[in-house]
Image (spheres, rainbow, N blue to C red):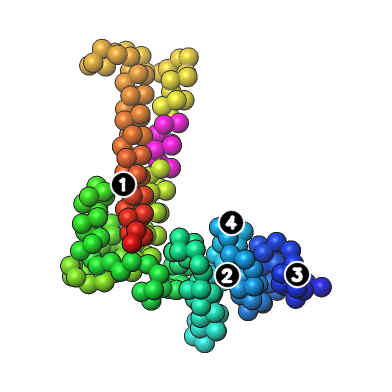
Amino acid sequence: MSLCLADPTLGRVTDVVRACREGENLSGAVRVVRQREPEWFRWRSAVRSVCWETGKLFGRNRVRTEEPVREMVLDLSDHSLRQEVVVDARRYGMDLDRGEVLPMRTEGDLRRLAYLMGVPFERLQRDLGLRGDFFAPVDTAAAVCVGRVYARAHQRRAHRWSGAAEELKQRSTVSCVGLSSSGVSMRDHHVGRYQELARIESQVSTGWGAFARTLLAG
């Protein structure tokens, strides 16, 4: 018997939900996550899988799946977990929050936070389709997603520049021979430049991360 058709309280929640997805039984997957004890790891991962599948649906099929998930999220006693599930769902096009879970934010709030955290507001304007209305409410979950995406992207760049600097330092021979204007070897000049780029990218990543965290703060 399929894990999805058996007792939904048996087996790892991620395995059971995957079996339901493979059997195209999304309602079964929803039933499984609703009957399991909410927690931050496997259960949250299972809910993300359900949201990913639900985000592909349209019309009545979507409503039949989305509403039970939304009710489940609103019933969570862990406020932080409830917020994270809402943000996870937004990544896949599901809007589970209608003002009950995440703080209400305006375009003016985003502009102010972007300035305080040192991140470019223009990216938010482009990605969120903001229209320049200072008092207009914004999609908080989507704004958090954007902030986290940029934080991860800049952190990856920081790691790449840092790795390039370490690799260059470890080379026993280099093709660039000579001295830079500062009097250090050309290799050391490039190492310093790479390290500075890594520092800048890491700083920008920190700013985007702080922007996303502040949006979720009550």
Q: Earlier in the sequence, mark 4 or mark 1?
A: 4
Mark 3 touches mark 2? (CB < 8 Å): no
User: CB under 8 Å between callouts 1 and 2?
Assistant: no
- Secondary structure, magenta segment, majority class: helix
User: Residue beneath label 3, please?
Assistant: 3
Lower position in the chain sequence, tag 3 or tag 4: 3
The amino acid at mark 2 is: Val
User: The residue under label 1 is which amino acid type?
Assistant: Gly
Could you tell me how far apart the alpha carbons at marks 3 and 4 are, in whole angstroms? 20 Å
| Precedes in sequence: disc 3 or disc 2 | 3
Secondary structure under tag 2 reads helix
> Would residue 161 be found to the left or right of residue 9 on screen?
left
Counting other residues with Cα less than 10 Å from the Cα at mark 3, is it few (<14), some (14-19), or many (20 or more)? some
Q: Is mark 4 in CB contact (under 8 Å) with mark 1?
A: no
Q: Which residues are magenta?
A: 156-163
Q: Residue at x 38, y 76 (%)?
A: 98
Kindly state the secondary structure of the residue where label 3 is placed. Answer: loop
Q: Check disc 1 and report the residue beneath it.
A: 207
Which residue is under mark 2?
50
Return the residue at label 4. 41
